[in-house]
Amino acid sequence: MNETNIITAPVVTYSRHRLATDGQGVTTLVIFHGCPLRCRYCINPYTFDPKMKIKEFTPEMLYDELKIDDLYFRATGGGVTFGGGEPLLRADFLRCFREICGKQWHLCAETSLALPWENVYTASQCIDTFYIDCKDTDPDIYRNYTGKDNSLMLQNLEMLAKIVPPERIVVRLPLIPEFNTDENREKSKKRLSDMGIMNFDLFDYKIKP
Amino acid sequence: MNGKSRCKILKEIRKQIAERNDIEFITSECKYKGDCAGTCPKCESEVRYLEKELKKREAIGKTVIVAGLALAVTASAVGCTNEVQDNIEDAPKPSKDNYTDVDGFISTPQDFMGEPATIQLPSISYFLGLSQQERDEYISRYNRSDIRYDWSNDSAVYEDTLDTFYVNESGAVYIIKVAYDENGTAVSIEIKEDEVPGGVEIPMGAVPVE
């Protein structure tokens, strides 16, 4: 049975020719619909809006759309970054997509890791670089901001760090106004460093009125 | 990063792919003014052209180099400003090998001696890449009323072809005017040599004559 024609994923949109924002080289960002979290300052809240218009793609359909930039991907070490929403909810889709696009495209995933380990493991076999939105390792801060517990995210991160090389993981630690402080962020960084995480992206949320 | 900056980077990538694989590739400076997404039908057609040429090379057993050859271009995009650098010095320097026609200019095979010739003018950047002697030869050749210029096939060439501009090298200034008919076909070209007053510097490709 050819899975590439059966598995589908809801795509909200995709954005071509991204440079220096979603990984190395020229990238296309694919935004999936659906997310287990409800972050207070979510940058893409339409990704969990049930009324959002989406299009269901099979891996082959998506590849056919994105291959228009194959030359740029190969020349620059770029490829496709999957975001959303939560792209690892579509881990089987990503696996099939990798089978179609081959090894030359660099595939990234921007994920919260707040989902079953099986999804994370499947993604670890086909995603080159994980950008993990940790928010904060403090459980209260995490719950206040996302509405969920962070123990699943931390367990997944610990296991992922054991099965993929450290250069394939980048953990994003934001400074979120009214939710955490620099001190909280430093504590998160220390805890994750002890876990074996070596790459961090520290940045500040800028809240627009 | 705005669309223009993005376009410039993507064009540089295309240029590098062409150069590394010995693909004849003559691009032109984008004259579109205003916001854009960083790509357009013309840019996309250049990519399709490169893909086709690379496939041809692969089919005859030639080594094709693509993977990772433009890493440095995108690495320099980090921290890129929003200014589009229109640097004439960065204009591509063509070689005579790029052209298949006699006298080193792109044209359909026509008899220059007496029959009207259809000629696609090279881009400004090409012209500026010529030596002074080559420019003199070009200008003397095209001061003829029996030469017509076909713009219809490539609007980008039309946008980027010689119209009225100064070339300032060693104090020599050339003023070129092209007259068009009602169909937009250039019907005559007038080239005048003028002198730059001492001490005055005129930017390349700048102010029109009027």
Image (spheres, coloured by chain):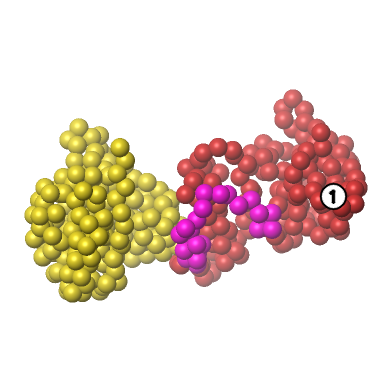
Residue A21 picture location, percent across and down: 38, 55
The residue sitting at 86% across, 39% down in the picture is: B190
Magenta residues (range): B69-91
Q: Residue B86 in magenta?
A: yes
SS type, badge 1: loop
Q: Which chain is red?
A: B
Residue A119 picture location, percent across and down: 14, 59
Give the residue furthest to the top. Answer: B182
The residue sitting at 24% across, 52% down in the picture is: A176
Q: How many marks can you see?
A: 1
Please state which of residues B153 and A12 is positioned toward the viewer in this rendering: A12
Q: Which residue, given by chain and number where applicable, does mark 1 sit on? A: B200
Q: Is residue B185 visible?
A: yes
Residue A40 shown left or right of residue B54 in the figure: left
The residue sitting at 56% across, 44% down in the picture is: B42
Residue A169 shown left or right of residue A19 in the figure: left
Q: Is residue A84 above or below residue B150?
A: below
Q: Is residue B154 visible?
A: no
The amino acid at mark 1 is Val
Mark 1 — on which chain does it sit?
Answer: B
The residue sitting at 41% across, 52% down in the picture is: A18
Dominant secondary structure, magenta: loop
Q: Is residue B46 above or below residue A46?
A: below
Q: Colour of chain A?
A: yellow
Residue A25 picture location, percent across and down: 42, 60
